[in-house]
Image (spheres, rainbow, N blue to C red):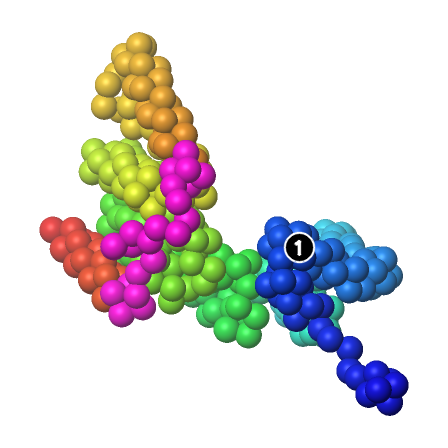
């Protein structure tokens, strides 16, 4: 008997609790509390992670500070000797800054986790800006191109550069830089057609719409952030078209569509973008449509009340609706096939409108 007692294996806590509940020695609620208490006691002390967290924060802070110092020092050096050096030296300086920041991003070790991702994305964003300056110098000073051609060269180069960095890193910062580069490229290409001033903004709007649709379908991730990027880009494009009557209609339709989408999808981030975008496009649109001292504030008061009501509606539905109930048709997340199809249709439609208006 003593030999068996000495060699008996310890019984797991979960098995003991199930046995005690079955024998009615304790209640299921007491078993849950004991199990929770045992899990907490089994956790390693949180203080063990403090040295690593502190070193990561120091690494991140030093990386940001170093990147800022590199950029500021380069600007100071350039300002002192810019007029005394030739075009080649200017290209070397700006291109060297872009290369150093790019290499610094690649040199960050993967083992430091999220800190490394944030630091790398910021360094690569600064490298993208320096690369844009390099292309501007190359096109304007070295190649002596016209202003619109330099704009196309810089925007297309930045789009390609940012796309390559996004493929490597897949961070939201690089995704945003890629989207901005593609929007500017669309505007530059449209501007090459010698059209009116509103059509480049419409091209920007079209690229942003495609972005929103690809985010909706999960082709671009994170889904909600990509949709918010697209909605913000649509407002940015619509803003540049407001002097025309068609642009005013486009801006107001964008506001309605983004806010309505946020309400249907119960997306507070999208609603925030819609509210901010509406605040930017509404005053100028209302003043153009209703030239009166009292019309603009009244319309803004009504729209503001509607936005507050939409926010309260989303917040109440998100917190009061049972989580276990799954709607029969959830349109807030599309499929990649549907998203790519819708994005292709939108791109073709925008391109056709631009070409037709350019030929008229």
The answer to whether residue 344 of the structure is visible from this angle is no
Q: How many marks?
A: 1
Q: Position of residue 25 (x, y in %)?
A: 67, 57
| Residue at (38, 59) in percent of width and height | 215
Which residue reaches farthest top?
294
Magenta region: which residues? Answer: 316-339
Q: Is residue 44 left or right of residue 270?
A: right
Q: Position of residue 211 (x, y in %)?
A: 36, 58
Disc 1 marks which residue? 26
Nearest the viewer among 336 and 347 is: 336
Q: Is residue 261 left or right of residue 180?
A: left
| Residue at (28, 23) in percent of width and height | 286
| Residue at (40, 26) in percent of width and height | 308
SS majority, magenta: loop
Q: Is residue 85 left or right of residue 166?
A: right
Q: Quadrant of residue 267?
A: top left
Q: Position of residue 349 (x, y in %)?
A: 18, 58
| Residue at (23, 58) in percent of width and height | 346
Nearest the viewer among 108 and 73 is: 108
Indicate whether residue 184 is drawn in magenta.
no
Nearest the viewer among 100 and 95 is: 100
Mark 1, secondary structure of its residue: loop
Indicate whether residue 331 is drawn in magenta.
yes
Q: Position of residue 310 (x, y in %)?
A: 36, 31
Say above or below: 172 vs 13: above
């Amino acid at each position: 008997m003593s030999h068996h007692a000495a060699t008996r294996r310890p019984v797991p806590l979960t098995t003991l609790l199930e046995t005690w509940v079955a024998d009615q020695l304790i209640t299921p609620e007491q078993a849950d509390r004991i199990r929770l208490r045992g899990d907490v006691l089994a956790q390693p002390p949180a203080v063990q992670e403090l040295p690593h967290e502190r070193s990561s924060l120091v690494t991140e802070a030093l990386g940001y500070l170093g990147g800022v110092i590199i950029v500021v020092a380069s600007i100071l050096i350039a300002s002192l000797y810019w007029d005394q050096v030739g075009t080649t030296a200017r290209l070397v300086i700006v291109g060297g800054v872009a290369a150093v920041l790019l290499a610094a991003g690649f040199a960050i070790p993967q083992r430091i986790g999220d800190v490394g991702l944030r630091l790398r994305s910021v360094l690569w964003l600064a490298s993208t800006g320096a690369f844009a300056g390099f292309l501007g110098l190359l096109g304007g000073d070295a190649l002596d191109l016209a202003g619109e051609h330099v704009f196309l060269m810089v925007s297309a180069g930045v789009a390609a550069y940012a796309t390559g960095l996004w493929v490597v890193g897949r961070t939201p910062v690089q995704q945003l830089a890629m989207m901005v580069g593609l929007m500017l490229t669309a505007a530059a290409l449209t501007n090459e057609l010698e059209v009116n001033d509103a059509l480049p903004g419409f091209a920007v709007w079209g690229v942003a719409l495609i972005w929103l649709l690809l985010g909706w379908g999960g082709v671009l991730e994170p889904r909600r952030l990509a949709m918010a990027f697209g909605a913000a880009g649509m407002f940015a494009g619509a803003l540049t078209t407001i002097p025309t009557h068609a642009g005013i209609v486009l801006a107001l339709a964008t506001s309605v569509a983004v806010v309505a989408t946020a309400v249907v999808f119960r997306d507070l981030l999208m609603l925030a973008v819609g509210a901010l975008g509406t605040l930017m496009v509404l005053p100028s649109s209302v003043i153009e449509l209703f030239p009166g001292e009292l019309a603009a504030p009244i319309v803004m008061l009504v729209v503001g009340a509607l936005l507050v009501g939409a926010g309260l509606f989303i917040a109440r539905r998100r917190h009061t609706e049972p989580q276990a109930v799954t709607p029969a048709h959830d349109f807030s997340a599309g499929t990649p096939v549907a998203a790519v199809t819708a994005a292709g249709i939108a791109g073709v439609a925008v391109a056709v409108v631009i070409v037709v208006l350019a030929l008229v």
